[in-house]
Amino acid sequence: MSMADEQERRPSPGTPDAAEETAPAKRILIVDDDQTVLESLSDFLQFHGFAVRAAPGASQGMQALAENDFDLVICDLVMPGMDGIALIKLIRESGKEVPLLVMTGFASIEYAVESMKAGAADFITKPLKLDHVMLIVNRVLETRSLRKMAQEREYYKDLSNSDGLTQISNFRHFNHLLRVEIDRQRRYHRPLTLLMIDIDDFKKTNDRHGHLIGDMVLIKIAGLLKSQIRGCDFVARYGGDEFTIILPEVSQKEALAVGRRIQKAIELHKFQSPDYKDIGSISVTIGIASFPQDAPDAKELVARADRAMYAGKSAGKNCICLFGDEQNVIRPQHRERGEGGAAGSSV
């Protein structure tokens, strides 16, 4: 094998895993200045179905990592120019999350601890015992696969709960959270208040400026809503240009203060296109209903907060309306746009 060319060695047709087309061979990079070790370990791993690339030094190893993705890196701890621990640190600093297995001719716990602190997954000693090497390699690769599966499950869980545009909770997740919170507040005899929030005349914004600008407005509104609530509150995109906020342990009167803060934050924000053209003022209408004062369960609470919001729409928009007092709409006080830190920022 030519070390200078760093040829990648793939499983031969006669190896046990070569026929498994559904599972591509795991890719392993071996970095060692000892050509004998490099060749014998490469041949051994290739025989067991791995795709192997060999590098005779740390610099060649880093070049290989820059050009390809690997499932595992096996490197020697003692090499000229850059030792294995320095290589491990460099790989970690580069952002590569590939697991690293180190080889050392010094069977000392100090080297093992130092390599682990640097980021190695495990270590093996020289002279190599190939059956032990296979055991460690398989264990490290299995651990990597399990972690990757766990990360993917968490990713898809987050994806299923989030609105694709605004990255806040979606309608499905909102319904689940509302039922959970209603049950909890019922057990502890505490109030819960729901805000239904609709952007006024959003269709006109889309028609006048286009759907791209409309999407940017939705994203910014979602951010402004999040900025005005506590960490224990939940904001979600209910659908289209409508949002909702769950306020656990908050009465209707206390929720009114939250609604006022939201209206003020949106009123003071200067919505602009990417080329800094003024989009114009944006306002919202908010309907408020509380559990158990206004509704006995989650379904009725949504319906009554929605009814209050539509009463505000009928009364002229840009207002807050409390369920049970729909005739008394609450409008924001006039404020200068220059007031507050939010003014002047773009979408």
Image (tube, rainbow, N blue to C red):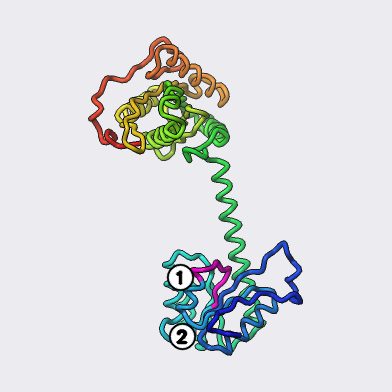
Q: How many numbered dots are placed on residues in this image? A: 2
Q: In this image, 199 relative to 331: left or right?
A: right
Q: Which mark is residue 91?
A: 1
Q: Is residue 65 above or below residue 270?
A: below
SS label for mark 1 = helix
Q: Which mark is residue 329?
A: none
Decide which of tag 2 and tag 1 comes sooner along the chain. 2
What's under tag 1, amino acid-wise? Answer: Ile
Q: Position of residue 318 (x, y in %)?
A: 37, 19
Residue contact between numbered discs 2 and 1, judged by CB atoms under 8 Å: no
Q: Is residue 206 above or below residue 115?
A: above
Q: Which mark is residue 79?
A: 2
Farthest-out residue, top: 327
Q: Is residue 68 magenta?
A: yes
Crowdedness of circle 1 by 10 Å Cα count: few (<14), some, many (20+)?
Answer: some
Residue in the image at 41% along x and 9% along y: 327
For the record, the magenta segment spans: 65-74
Where does the C terminus fall, quadrant-wise?
Answer: top left
CA gap, disc 2 to disc 1? 16 Å
SS label for mark 2 = loop
Q: Position of residue 313 (x, y in %)?
A: 44, 16
Where does the N terminus fall, quadrant-wise?
Answer: bottom right
Answer whether residue 187 is visible to the viewer in this image: no
